[in-house]
Image: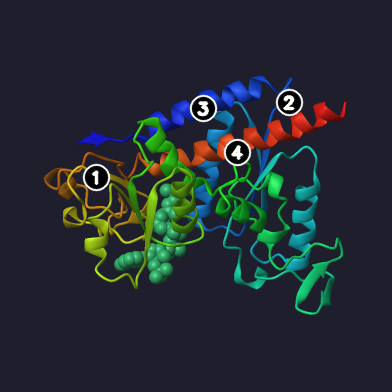
Amino acid sequence: MLVLKGSEAAARIKKEVQEMVEGLGGHVPTAAIVRVGERPDDLSYERNVMKKIASFGMEARSFAFPESIREGEFQAEFQKINDDPSIDGILLFCPLPRHMNGLTFEIIEIGAVKLNSRMEIVDTFEELIRPEKDLDGISPVNRARIFAGEKDGFAPCTAEAVIEILKTYQIPMEGKRAVVVGRSMVVGRPLSMLFLKENATVTVCHTKTADLKAVCREADILVAAAGKAGMISGEFVKPGAVVADVGINVDENGALKGDVEWDGLEAAAAAAATPVPGGVGSVTTAVLCRHLAEAAMRKYGAEQAQN
Ligand code: NDP
């Protein structure tokens, strides 16, 4: 069985990013990493992202706010970052603390539609983030672009990371049966759209799927993104299938486990699979870096066109 290593995909993406950065006339793409609170997962992801962006020859600035910050105050700070021309891209850690579920600034209601003072339809911070700076594809504009299969949208980085690993190893997707277990807005749904764009035939599974095992066994490409350690055993895998494991679960000893039972894959005669750790997760931050370089390139291109 071929092990699909995230490091291979990340190295390929790094080369692409470095070429993009070289074409920016000395401008160093700069990201804002915006965090509210001190969740250990966020802190560890933030460290990873900051390191990765620097290692790709770009810059990252951390904007951390206490969990106790008032929503209005955070909103004003966030808007400054959003509008700052020296910031090319933003990673906003979600979910935000519960008291920040909706925006509180001046809202004008016209029937069922809410507009802010800039006359934009807004309800949440996801809606406030400028789509051209939205590195992790959380804004409604980017979601719509991904849904429509447009090339200019930023997809959520993890969903795109799955496609990137398959492309790195030249695994064909066109005409293949792709089954995605999980339908979250972060992974399952956008990934199903990205597979469609690659001309795969897609099935999306969830907790109400009847006979999950049988559906998974139809997959040429099976993606596990449920967040349930080891739930995909060898019995779910068709011989010759390619398996991508998005799950990140921490066991009682603190070790990382995927959603796929790795030991069952050889016996199931899977053709290839991504490990955990060292698979999809390690490509996610590389994709984020490429989004940052792309955001900077688009801005640079627009400025050049104006001059
Ligand atoms: P969510 O909890 O938001 O979504 C999980 C999805 O899986 C839901 O759609 C749920 O169905 C479905 N699901 C859960 N259990 C089962 C089951 N037993 N059978 C069928 N479907 C099931 O998780 P995320 O999408 O945010 O994350 C999924 C996994 O990916 C997690 O382990 C997370 O840690 C990891 N992850 C990894 C990243 C990376 O960089 N590699 C980044 C983001 C996430 P339903 O909708 O019916 O509830």
Between label 1 and label 2, give the one nearer the viewer.
1
Relative height, residue 144 to residue 68 (above, below): above
| First in residue order: circle 1 vs circle 2 | 2
The quarter of the picture where residue 179 lies is bottom left
In the rendered structure, which amino acid carries the disc numbered 2? His
Which quarter is ligand 1 in?
A: bottom left
Q: Secondary structure at mark 1?
A: loop
Check the image and name the residue furthest to the left. 267
In x, y percent, where is residue 79?
78, 54
The residue identified by callout 1 is: 241
Disc 1 residue crowd, few under 14, some 14–19, many 20+, Cα 10 Å:
many
In x, y percent, where is residue 120?
80, 62
In the rendered structure, which amino acid carries the disc numbered 4? His
Q: Secondary structure at mark 4?
A: helix
Q: Is residue 20 left or right of residue 278?
A: right
| First in residue order: circle 4 vs circle 2 | 2
Q: What whole-number distance in Å separates the C-alpha atoms at marks 1 and 2?
A: 44 Å
